[in-house]
Structures are given as C-alpha cells and as structure tokens.
Amino acid sequence: QKIGEGGFGVVYMAEQTEPVRRRVALKVIKLGMDTKEVIARFEAERQALAMMDHPNIAKVFDAGATEL
C-alpha cells in the first residue's frame, strides 16, 4: 500500500517477516531517478536517519539495492 511520495522516492507500507515480523515503511527510488546523485542523496538520508533516536523519527532497520 502506497503511503507517501517525495521528489525521488515512493514510500509503501510493507511487512517484514525476518528476522522479526513487523510492519515497516519501505522507501523505493522512482523509476528513472536512479542517478548517482539521487542514490548518494538517498544514502545520506539513510545515514542521517540511522544516527537519530527520537520517537517521532523513523528508525532504519535495513537498506539495500536490487537490479530490475
């Protein structure tokens, strides 16, 4: 289920099954937006979120890439 959209990404509600079962938000770079600059910005955002610890800020559980 799509729950949000930004300039270069779309956020979906998803269910993680391993290592623990939980509801998560999954952010995906939009098709055609996978330039080196956008990927670097995506990675910087992930790093910044991973360092934050606040109840109103999403936690980063995992990150990765896939080829289409």
Image (cartoon, grey):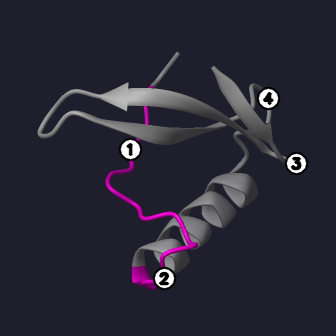
Q: CA distance from mark 4 to mark 3?
A: 12 Å
Viewer-side label of 1, 4: 1
Q: Nearer the viewer, residue 61 or 7?
A: 61
Q: Tell me if mark 4 has few (under 14), some (14-19) or many (20+) residues whose alpha carbon lies within 10 angstroms of its own.
A: few
Dot 4 or dot 3, earlier in sequence: 3
Mark 1 → mark 4, Cα distance in angstroms: 18 Å
The residue singled out by tag 1 in the image is 64
Q: How far apart are labels 1 and 2 at the CA level?
A: 23 Å
Q: Residue 33's image quarter?
A: top right
| Residue occupied by mark 3 | 7
Between 34 and 30, the one nearer to me in the picture: 30
Horizontal and vertical percent position of residue 55:
48, 76
Main secondary structure along the magenta-highlighted residues: loop
Residue type (three-letter) at the residue carrying disc 3:
Gly
- Give the mark nearest the N terminus, 2 or 3: 3
Q: Earlier in the sequence, mark 1 or mark 2?
A: 2
Q: Does 56 appear in magenta?
A: yes
Which residue is located at x 47 percent, y 84 percent?
52
- Left-right relation of 5 to 63: right
Tell me where the magenta segment starts and ends, as one range. Answer: 51-66
CA gap between label 4 and label 2 equals 33 Å
Q: Residue at x 71, y 33 (%)?
A: 3
Identify the mark at residue 32; answer none if there is no mark. Answer: 4
The mark found on residue 54 in the picture is: 2
Q: Earlier in the sequence, mark 1 or mark 4?
A: 4
Query: Gap in Å between the C-alphas at discs 3 and 1?
Result: 20 Å
